[in-house]
Amino acid sequence: MKSVKKAVVTVMAAGMLAACSGGGDSAGNDSTPSAAKSPKPAVKAPKEFDTSKGWQQNISWPDGDETELPVEAASKAGVVAFLQKKGEKYVVEAREAATGALRWSSQPWQPPAPGKNVAPDSSHLPQLLVVDQDDREYIAVWAWAPSFTEDDTFSLLLYPADSSGKEISPARTFSIPMPSHDKPRVVDGGNGLLVLWEDSRPGADRTTAIDLSKGRVTKYEELELPCGEDDLQPCKGPVEALSPDGPVVQLPVHGGFGVPGAWHSGDAVPPGSKIHNSKYKSGRVTEVLGGHVLSTWFPENGYGNQSVTAVHDLKSGKLVASTLCASESSGERRKAVLSPDGRHVVSDSVAVDLEQGKARCFYEGGDADPIRLTSVADGTAYGYSRADGESEKPVTVALDTGQVKPLPQGTEIPSLLLADTGGFVLKLAEGKGQGRQFVFHPRR
């Protein structure tokens, strides 16, 4: 599987401006054939972006300041995908990242409805995900419909990101019944898409793998993986990723992960980490990105909210890079982001150069101000620093030197980065709804 070049947009309350509505679906919930050019006002962006040029697109749903928005970048195809609401149905719009021109749009889709005894909430809204398998990017649209009286329903539609035309049909559709439980996690598994959920019953399926190229669906129970001989707990765990040589199993009791019969994280423990055992549960998969496994480990000598962040090669299990780093104690760990060229990964306060095999921490804990990195391209990362009791301040980071440069207050940080374009998320002007305006400016 080639590098997955995508970004996930999460709306953050800090650093946003109220913007004029212009284009997109601000007049209602209808998708539009074209996006507005020359956005006004222009974003106050870092100097690497030409704010005299660009385009914009609005999304009028969902509500909330801490909501993962249905927008994804497929940088190989050079498109930005929006999931627009049209009445009670949804339409995928894929727009040229450079111009905003509509490359393709999908037929309207009605997601499955929750059971009649279930009160609808935001967890039932459809979402987008870009997955790269067999050197081709796919736009996945999915929704979960819970039911208290029968099986839940997981529905998924797949569109090749390099499609063209209007009202195109999905290349594949899936409707998968699953035992009733909490909302599943849907992730790029490394060699396919994974649907994961919690189910503690013995023998219960914990993971469903979907092969995007072949349309094959495989359900996994917990699988065995070697662990410490002195532990009495069974050495079994759920599938958390898909390597070229088989599923990656996570041991929840002992810690550690690997591919049965191929490799084990115990053979590539990051320096300064506790080895796997049931006391520390050290070595836990957090994400798969660009052909690599991201994981966290309990440190031998650390304190408070410190942990070791490590990156392993998905195929071989070889340790690529690691670093001891702290994370903010408040708030959940945010999704990692891969640069458009597939070289750099940023995750919270950690930046990794996959080509050089180096990881760097930008928050050592203690009295240091945390720096949270949110996007990266061409060796430059963007994010925010925040001292106790102060608002977040925008910064850029040169990853080759580690130099952190503060930006003028009010500078917007790109949430989406493609090869030649940066996407910025703004609040709609007052009275224009609870959605967001996406403004795109070319990189100089």
Image (cartoon, rainbow, N blue to C red):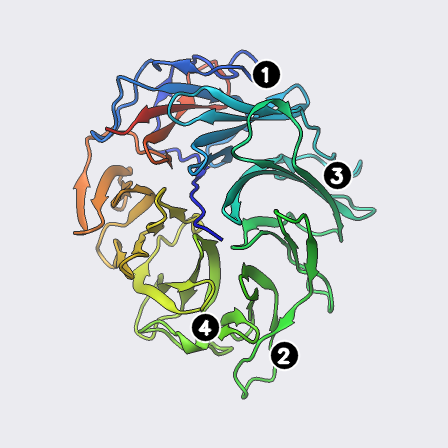
| Left or right: residue 334 compared with residue 216 | left
Label pair 1/4, CB-CB below 8 angstroms:
no
Q: Nearer the viewer, mark 1 or mark 2?
A: 1
| Left or right: residue 246 compared with residue 427 | right
Does label 2 or label 3 sit earlier along the sequence?
3
Amino acid identity at mark 3: Val
What is the CA distance from the residue labelled 1 to the residue labelled 2? 53 Å
| Left or right: residue 91 compared with residue 283 | right
Q: Which residue is labeled 2 in the image?
A: 234
Label 2 Cα neighbours within 10 Å, binned few <14 / some 14-19 / many ≥20: few
Tell me: residue 247, above or below residue 409: below
Horizontal and vertical percent position of residue 130? 52, 41
Q: Which residue is labeled 1 in the image?
A: 30
Does label 1 or label 4 sit earlier along the sequence?
1
Helix, strand or loop for disc 3: loop
Q: Which residue is labeled 3 in the image?
A: 118
| Residue 430 in view, yes or no | yes
Label 3 Cα neighbours within 10 Å, binned few <14 / some 14-19 / many ≥20: few
Label 4 Cα neighbours within 10 Å, binned few <14 / some 14-19 / many ≥20: many
Tell me: residue 91, above or below residue 173: above
Amino acid identity at mark 4: Ser
| Front residue (pair 48, 237) | 48
What is the CA distance from the residue labelled 3 to the residue labelled 4? 41 Å
Indicate which disc residue 265 carries.
4
Amino acid identity at mark 1: Asp
Amino acid identity at mark 2: Pro
